Image (tube, rainbow, N blue to C red):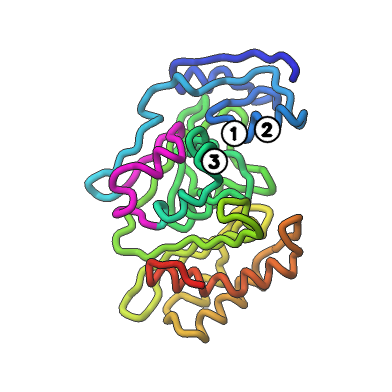
Amino acid sequence: MTPFELQEPKTLKQAVGLLDPDDPTVRPLAGGTALMLMMKAGVFAPTRLVSLAKVEPEYSAITIAPSGEMHIGAMVTLSLLERQKGIAAAFPVIARTLPHLSNVRVRNVACVGGALAHGDPHMDLPPVLAALGAKVAIVGPNGTREAAVEDLYTGYYETMIKRDELIAEAIVPPLAGRKAAYLKFTARSADDWPALGVAVAFTADGDKLRDVRVVVSAATAKVMRLADAEAALEGGTSDEATLRAAGEAAAEEAPVIGDVRGSAAYKRELLRVCVGRAVRQALSGKPVH
């Protein structure tokens, strides 16, 4: 590993000032679970790492407002989010997802901001937050801007975040009675990288599905919403014909790619089946096989 400079600013503003918009070898460091692997493998050789470990404590905190809106600081670890009091009641889909996100050693170190900023389409948290309609606050030299989670991703390991910007927090709107589920298919253990991830969220208006969001990950180069699948479900019921039509729409719409976890044809078939399963799981609150 080549030598590099390590900076430990005390504020997020100072951290932003230490980043260089023109130098890709200067990176922020949060949990470092992905960055350190890249460095050890020789894929990335930094000249400067800007550690966020000592920035203001507010960025390591979780707050749930009386309205139900949740603010998750970028330096909150995945294990802290998993254990946070009130999460299971306020956002059960997050509570169900986190225990199967990587392994406990990674969750003890990995941070929410890094999980969102890394841009790896196989990660579990981005599609869940995208389905919930979450947004992120991004801090840069010119102030703070907000972006929907699904809009963060522009390509494979590519995001809209500039080199001199940092995610400060994730903001999750109140569930307010909405149903949500995340279903992932792994070829090996449950905490492995998925071949496919599907997240859904909707309001159950009697027997009708309203305000539907369908998000796909892992089988595509980036986390993305599937507008055609959403349209197939909107206003419909959870009957077999509607769910089958939504699965077909998703399989036709998604730009599925193959990799070591499965061919494009295999993943497309998974998607065709899993959209309906995710809807059923959201309605029941229990895994559907």
User: Tag 1's secondary structure?
Assistant: loop
Task: Identify the residue position indicated by label 2 in the image.
Answer: 37
The numbered mark at residue 78 is none
Taking depth in this image into account, of 288 and 127 the one nearest to the observer is 288
Of circles 3 and 2, the one toward us is 2
Q: Is residue 16 above or below residue 214?
A: above
Q: Is residue 106 left or right of residue 187?
A: left
Q: Is residue 232 left or right of residue 238?
A: right
Q: Is residue 71 left or right of residue 272?
A: left
User: Tag 2's secondary structure?
Assistant: helix
Where is residue 229? Give x, y as percent.
55, 72
Cβ–Cβ below 8 Å for labels 3 and 2?
no
Residue at x 62% of width, y 59% of height: 186
Amino acid under label 1? Answer: Thr
The numbered mark at residue 115 is 3
Cβ–Cβ below 8 Å for labels 3 and 1?
no
- Magenta run includes residue 78: yes
Residue 20 is drawn in which quadrant? Answer: top right
Taking depth in this image into account, of 135 and 50 the one nearest to the observer is 50
Taking depth in this image into account, of 255 and 261 the one nearest to the observer is 261
Where is residue 185? Give x, y as percent.
60, 62
Task: Identify the residue position indicated by label 1 in the image.
Answer: 33
**Magenta region: which residues?**
69-92
